[in-house]
Image: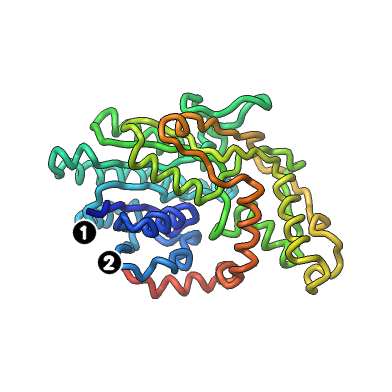
Amino acid sequence: MKQRILVTGGAGFIGSAVVRHLLTSGKCIVGNIDKLTYAGNTESLASIDSTDDYHFFKVDICDRAGVEDVFEAFRPDAIMHLAAESHVDRSIDDPSAFIQTNIIGTYTLLEAARNYWRTLGLETQKTFRFHHISTDEVFGDLEGAESLFTELTPYAPSSPYSASKAASDHLVHAWHRTYGLPIVVTNCSNNYGPFHFPEKLIPHVILNALQGKPLPIYGDGSQVRDWLYVEDHARALVKVLNRGRVGETYNIGGHNEKRNLEVVEVICDLLDEYVPPGKSSASENISSYRELITFVIDRSGHDRRYAIDASKIKNELGWVPEESFETGIRKTVEWYLENRQWWESVLNGDYRLARLGTSVE
């Protein structure tokens, strides 16, 4: 019998990768509950949209009645909770949506899941899982060049975004301890790969470069992040869902620490290789895309370094990333060059029109 998995935020970047991964396995029936905010793009799910094992529900996770209706209609065996506001700059400009979605939304989903879980038979209750997907940003930043975030690192969030995600993590653990809801939590490092919304660093740099626009880098670009290819992350999440110990947290990292400036330079060099400057009017005045790099004033409270110790998931579950940064970033650049229609639809807003025709269960 196929496992019935309800994914929240399944039209987002990581969520859509998870939905595609689950459905291509042929072992799952997937329900996708998504409000379709600006970052939700149903075109990212075009490859699986017509399969009978996929069901879409356009519902805000803060809508208790709507969420409960989805539980009753879909009858999930597990929840993978990815729905979240996730852009740090947006959280600094206006924290309200982050408080609403990441905290109130998680609370609403937990209560709906708890009430649903209590109606299940005892054996089904034991196998049910609520998997909460979070970020390494809840830990703040690291001191020194060798230290790493572990599952026991104290929380010290720096931005409204990371603070709201930290709060949601605590809620999930509390619902396990207080009510016995069977949960697992994962905290991941920076994701990148296909279908990434253009406001984030890597796609923003790729698309700006192709258009001959400046490539903005905060401060001096020395901020360090651990980069995780999104499809590696999807594989890890499914492994934690099915094999992780109840009540435990697992850190998921890419083992690829890079300075932001280094990331941008690698992208520029790949574009120099694939789309040599001078081949289009957008790049006719430069000899390398590196010439477009522009340093801008650093953002408030910008964490200097994140790095994940992913030894627990490796030792307990046997997961390690398949992609190095070099192979993953090459695949990413190639995908954006080969899928111009997808990102042009995002940039001009047409993807929002495509959502109007999305079928809802």
Q: Secondary structure at mark 1?
A: helix
**Residue under label 1:** 73
Position of residue 12 measured from the top left corner of the image (x, y, whole percent): 46, 57
Position of residue 280 measured from the top left corner of the image (x, y, whole percent): 78, 73
Position of residue 233 measured from the top left corner of the image (x, y, whole percent): 49, 46
For residue 48, side relative to residue 147 (left or right): left
Check disc 2: other Cα within 10 Å, few if <14, some if 14-19, many if 20+: few
Position of residue 353 measured from the top left corner of the image (x, y, whole percent): 47, 74
Type of amino acid under label 1: Ala
The residue that appears at 25% across and 45% down in the rendered structure is 113
Q: Secondary structure at mark 2?
A: loop
- Counting the numbered discs, the total is 2
**Residue under label 2:** 361
Marks 1 and 2, how far apart at CA: 9 Å
Indicate the quadrant where residue 26 lies: bottom left
- Is 159 or 316 nearer to us in this picture? 316
Q: Which mark is residue 106?
A: none
- Do the numbered discs 1 and 2 sit on residues whose CB atoms are within 8 Å? yes
